[in-house]
Image (cartoon, grey):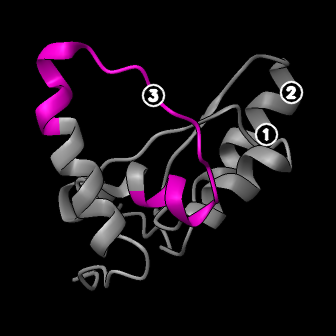
Amino acid sequence: HEQKIPLSPGYQVPGAEAVKSGAGIPVAAVGLITEPEQAQDILAEGKADLILLARVLLREPYWPLRAAAVLGRTETLQVPPQYERGWNTLGKMTRDAAIGAPMAPLA
C-alpha cells in the first residue's frame, strides 16, 4: 500500500508542533521550509524550537546569510583569523546580491 503525502510549504511542521505540545520537549521542524520569514514565524509561534534545512541549502548555499539580511539581523560575528578572507569575500557577495536574489524553482 503506497501512501501519498501532500507536499506544501512547511508540511511537516504540524507534526513537530504536536510532539512539542504532547511531549513537552524541544523539537525541530522540517519540510519545505524555504523562506526566512516562514522559518521565523514557525519559531515565533512556538511550533518548533529549531529549523532544519536540507534541499534549500543545496539550491542556495548562502541561505542563512540571506535570511539574516532579509530579517534585518546586523550582529557582527567573530570569525577565526584563518577564515577572515573567505568570510569577507562571502559578506561582500551576500551584501551585493543576496537580498532579492532569485531562488532556483522547485522541480
Q: Quadrant of residue 84?
A: top left
Q: Whole-Å distance between the Cαs marked 1 and 2?
A: 6 Å
Which residue lies at the image location 46% right of the left edge and 40% below the top edge? 52
Say which label, 3 or 2, has the lower sequence index.
2
Horizontal arrangement in the rendering, residue 64 relative to residue 14 (left or right): left
Residue 8 lies, with reference to residue 3, above or below; the image says below
Instruction: Please give the residue where the numbered disc 2 appears in the rendered image.
Output: 22
Q: Quadrant of residue 21?
A: top right
Q: Amino acid at mark 3?
A: Leu
Secondary element under disc 1, as helix, strand or loop, is helix
Q: Whole-Å distance between the Cαs marked 3 and 2?
A: 36 Å
Q: Nearer the viewer, residue 68 or 56?
A: 68
Q: Within 10 Å of the Cα at label 2, are there few (<14), some (14-19), or many (20+) other Cα atoms? A: few
Q: Which mark is residue 77?
A: 3
Q: Nearer the viewer, mark 1 or mark 3?
A: 3
Q: Nearer the viewer, residue 81 or 32?
A: 81
Which residue lies at the image location 63% right of the left edge and 60% below the top edge? 71
Q: Amino acid at mark 1?
A: Ala
Q: Which range is magenta?
A: 66-86
Please state, as top left, top right, bottom left or bottom right, where the N terminus lies in the image.
bottom left
Residue 16 lies, with reference to residue 84, above or below; the image says below
- In contact (CB < 8 Å): disc 1 and disc 2: yes
Residue 40: image x %, image y %? 69, 54
Instruction: Please give the residue where the numbered disc 1 appears in the rendered image.
Output: 18
Which residue lies at the image location 42% right of the left edge and 82% below the top edge? 100
Q: Whole-Å distance between the Cαs marked 1 and 3?
A: 34 Å
Q: Nearer the viewer, mark 3 or mark 2?
A: 3
